[in-house]
Image (cartoon, helix red, strand yellow):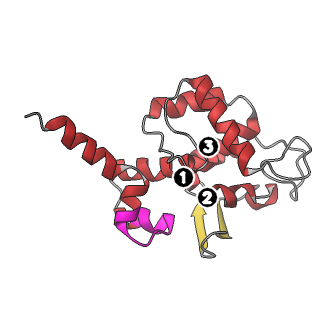
Amino acid sequence: MNIVQPIRKKTDINKMKAALGNPRDKLLFIFGINSALRISDILKLKVGDVRGKDAITLSETKTRKTKRFIFNKAIKDALKLIPKESNDDAPLFPSRKGDKAISRVQAYRVLNEAAKRAGVNVEIGTHTLRKTWAFHAYKRGYDLTIIQGALNHSSQRETLRYIGIVQDDIDNVYMEVNL
């Protein structure tokens, strides 16, 4: 199993947004990097879960814990990509058939194809979305315990490893120690 990485550079995030021409796929990416939700929870969402709302509360599939988060400006702007005629019971990320959501595999394909088109050289997967949010929150100086809580991790060490900070620190040591 490949270990996926966060998208560390803001320029790469912008390249990804530009490479995702399909409104559904762009919404998936923006929602994912701004919500810290797992893909399994994102793909379960219906249009009515988000339309006209400023926040959402859900029960996480993996942990069964209740999670609440508010929509930031990026998510609110991206939600404008939802077609006006969409029924509230429709999946937020519909498959071509429209009656059900895209699969986790399709989400993976969408993200990887966009990364290739954008020239983003990062190990991309569906977890990249969640890791990207956590990485940028950490780099902006937010308290690690808050990030840990948002991700529902059991330890700060797990959170640092998850977002690649531990490996970054190890890499820096190798670069700095020149004997």
Q: Residue furthest front?
A: 1
Q: Report x, y in % for residue 103.
A: 77, 50
* Residue ID for mark 1: 130
Residue picked out by circle 3: 30
Secondary structure, mark 2, is loop
Q: Are marks 3 and 2 in contact (CB under 8 Å)?
A: no
Q: Position of residue 14 (x, y in %)?
A: 54, 30
Question: What are the residue bounds of the magenta stretch?
Answer: 146-158
| Callout 1 touching callout 2 (CB < 8 Å) | yes
Residue 2 is left or right of residue 19, and the answer is: left
Mark 3 or 2: the one toward you: 2
Residue at figure coordinates x 59%, y 70% from the top left = 67
Vertical placement of residue 78 versus 45, above or below: above
Left or right for 165, reference 134: left
Q: Position of residue 26 (x, y in %)?
A: 68, 37
The magenta stretch spans residue 152: yes
Badge 1 amino acid: Arg
In this view, the mark in front (3 or 1): 1
